[in-house]
Amino acid sequence: MSNPAAQVSPGKATLQHSLRLGAFALGTAALLVFADNLTKAQIDLHRLEFEQQLLIQVLPASLHDNDLTANSFRLGPDSRAYRQPELLGLSTTRTGYLATMKGMPAGVILPFETEGYGGAIVLVIGIATDGSITGVRVLQHGETPGLGGQIDISESQWITGFNQHSLTDTPESKWQVKGDGGNFDQFVGATITPRAVVAAVHNALLFFEANKNVLLAAGSKKEP
Ligand SMILES: Cc1cc2nc3c(=O)[nH]c(=O)nc-3n(C[C@H](O)[C@H](O)[C@H](O)COP(=O)(O)O)c2cc1C
């Protein structure tokens, strides 16, 4: 004989079932949100680590003794604090850094952009106070691997060809690829990408020259 106290009415059973189902759905949703946040945090951390490694590559530790990330400033397409901000080709506001040695300005790291064969190319350039390039690296690009992709240090050393050069040692007419009469190598069958990068590096140097005093004096300047 069944125990009447243990019997559950059909209505109550449906309610219990619905409650269990609801709790399960809520738990699953919470787990998904947690996993999503964790993934985003890991991606942000990797991006930060990647950017910090690049900063050291474009302005080596031997040339400065400050924490670059603590001396950052914002640069954007409409930055009014600077002359000719359009020279950097920025499509959005990005971060620049002031390098110092024993409290004195040692150089800057500037973000800049150009349009390549496969879309926007985002780069950073390190420039010493004397206007010479300490390094250039690509942050993002959509160029074809084996062709324009060779601008990325992971594919070739081409980008290191800018090191030490300045507006003083390379006249205006030589800021081009060799095929156009300039000083910089191009890639076989892929001239569009290096042509765009050479012109953009030249423009970044012109921006530095036009804004040298502001940039070197105000590393902590916060641009809205
Ligand atoms: C599938 C494909 C991908 C290409 N990717 C690039 C590229 O990433 N960068 C580039 O400069 N040219 C690229 N090119 C070649 C360009 O269309 C163009 O021919 C070349 O840049 C011109 O260089 P050249 O004057 O040395 O021939 C690509 C061509 C094809 C068909």
Image: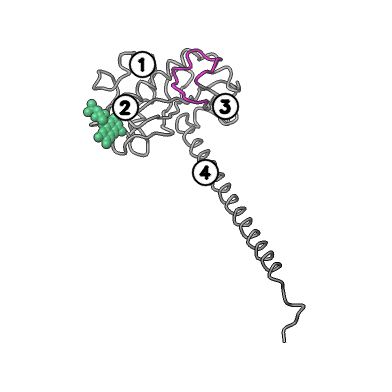
Q: Amino acid at mark 3?
A: Ser
Q: Is residue 79 magenta?
A: yes
Q: Amino acid at mark 4?
A: Ile
Label 2 within 8 A of ligand 1 by Cβ? yes
Label 1 within 8 A of ligand 1 by Cβ? no
Which residue is pictured at 45% across the width and 30% down the height?
A: 58
- Other-residue count near label 3 (Cα within 10 Å), few / some / many at <14 / 14–19 / ≥20: many
Q: Provide the residue span drawn in magenta.
A: 77-93
Q: Earlier in the sequence, mark 1 or mark 2?
A: 1
Instruction: Say which mark, if any, is on residue 72.
Output: 3
Report x, y in % for residue 1: 72, 87
Helix, strand or loop at label 2? It is helix
Please state, as top left, top right, bottom left or bottom right, where the C terminus lies in the image.
top right
Secondary structure mainly formed by the magenta segment: loop
Q: Of discs 2 and 4, which sits in the foreground? A: 4
Instruction: Say which mark, if any, is on residue 43.
Output: 4
In contact (CB < 8 Å): disc 1 and disc 2? no
For this orientation, the residue located farthest to the right is 5
Please tell me in which quarter of the rendered image ligand 1 is found. top left
Q: Earlier in the sequence, mark 1 or mark 3?
A: 3
Q: Which residue is mark 1?
A: 169
Residue 201, quarter of picture? top left
Which one is nearer the viewer's eye here, 154 or 34? 34
Report x, y in % for residue 197: 36, 25
Q: Earlier in the sequence, mark 1 or mark 4?
A: 4
Q: Which residue is mark 2?
A: 194
Residue 214, quarter of picture? top right
Q: Amino acid at mark 2?
A: Pro
